[in-house]
Amino acid sequence: METTLVFRKIKRRDRYYVQVELASNSMHYFYVKNRPEFKWDASARCWEIIYTPDTASMLQELSELDRYAAIYLELGNMRYAWSPDFSWMERYSRSMAVYLEKFAHFLEHKRYSDQTCEGYANALEQFFRHQAIQRPEEITKDHLIDFNRNYILARRLSASYQNTVVNALKLFLVVIQETELSPFSLDRPRREHRLPNVLSKEEVKRIITAPLNIKHRLMLQLIYGCGLRAGELRRLRPVDILSDRQMLFVQQSKGKKDRMVPMPMSMIEQLRDYYRSERPRLYLFEGDVPGQPYAQRSLQLVFQNALRKTGIKKPATLHWLRHSYATHLLERVTDIRYIQELLGHSNTKTTMIYTHVGQKSLEQIRSPLDDL
């Protein structure tokens, strides 16, 4: 059986960590277990180590223990095959950290979301380290082309990640150098036009009823029943459930927007029972630490465990439940403008993509073969 090793970078309390997923009976496990620098994270169910240049050789040594191991880098919900090279950590200029800190303060001042701040900071840090850039004025278009070819494409990272690098770098140069990017411009990757992934109603029912734990079951049901993003669910508070009006108040979601969403009637009594039993301190769904929201990674694992129980072989992610919510509403002939409001989209064009995956509209089209 092939051994799998997964690396994941996270930020916690202004420090960066590398999370490592590995098999408990592998040589990676015995290496990590005997190194005091690695700590076990019970909530994420993986090992982690503080992310500093001093840990580069240790991570490199870990990745090279088994030449036949399948090694992945995980970004968001996606895993990419990876050939680890931590040497760029040693080439990283300490002086660039000052500029990155200044940039981070600018993002906070402009009230960018936490996810955007972290995404931009991670992308720039990776870019500066890989290109061994010492000062912002050294940056050229050739650096970005080289980074795209030898880092992003070599590791099969997504066009979305490439676009994040371009966005972050353009904004960084404007903020730090106060330049309009002359004499060079940074080109974006060609846009991908992909249809949203959708589960059938039967598949959704099997997934959201699979967990035996009432908290896990309610989280999945709310994501599908209200079309929530994972971050929106994690930020929900008991006061956001307006049971007398059968509505859910989603505060400051993507784009700093509030919205109201109808609550499934079948869930209101279940949520009351859950609240009386759990008595959450601040957030509706909390993890092991009272007053802290349920961990993003733990929520993903709840979905993956439910998916595994159902035996569904599709490479589904948690966000598929939101896509399925929108598509199933459309199949019930719900007005596209209402669906736009329920999903919190700023533009109807974003919502219109679901018209391409609705089964009922496609079923009405007859193949010309039937007329022969």
Image (cartoon, rainbow, N blue to C red):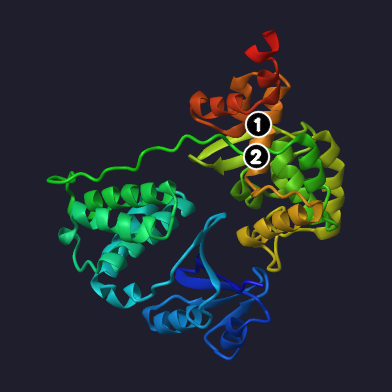
Quarter of the rendering occupied by the C terminus: top right
| Residue 273 higher or lower than 50, as above or below | above
- The percent coordinates of residue 140 (x first, y second) are 18, 55
The foreground one among 130 and 16 is 130
Query: In the image, what residue type sits under mark 2?
Result: Arg
70 vs 198: above or below: below
Q: Secondary structure at mark 1?
A: helix
Is residue 45 shown left or right of residue 221? left
Residue 307 placement, left or right of 172? right
Decide if residue 361 is in sight here.
Answer: yes
Please tell me which residue is depicted at 60% across the width and 33% down the height of the picture: 343
Q: Is residue 316 above or below residue 194?
A: below
- The residue indicated by pointer 1 is 326
Q: How many marks?
A: 2
Could you say which disc has been placed on residue 363 in the image?
A: none
Dividing the picture into quadrants, the one containing residue 353 is: top right
Residue 281 in percent (x, y) is at 72, 60
Q: In the image as oriented, which residue stretches furthest toward the front?
A: 372
Q: Which mark is residue 322?
A: 2
Q: CA distance from mark 2 to mark 1?
A: 6 Å
Label 1 amino acid?
A: Ala
Residue 334 shows in the view: no
Residue visible at 65% across and 39% down in the picture: 322
Image location of residue 24, percent across then percent down: 68, 79
Quadrant into which the N terminus falls: bottom right
Q: Are marks 2 and 1 in contact (CB under 8 Å)?
A: yes
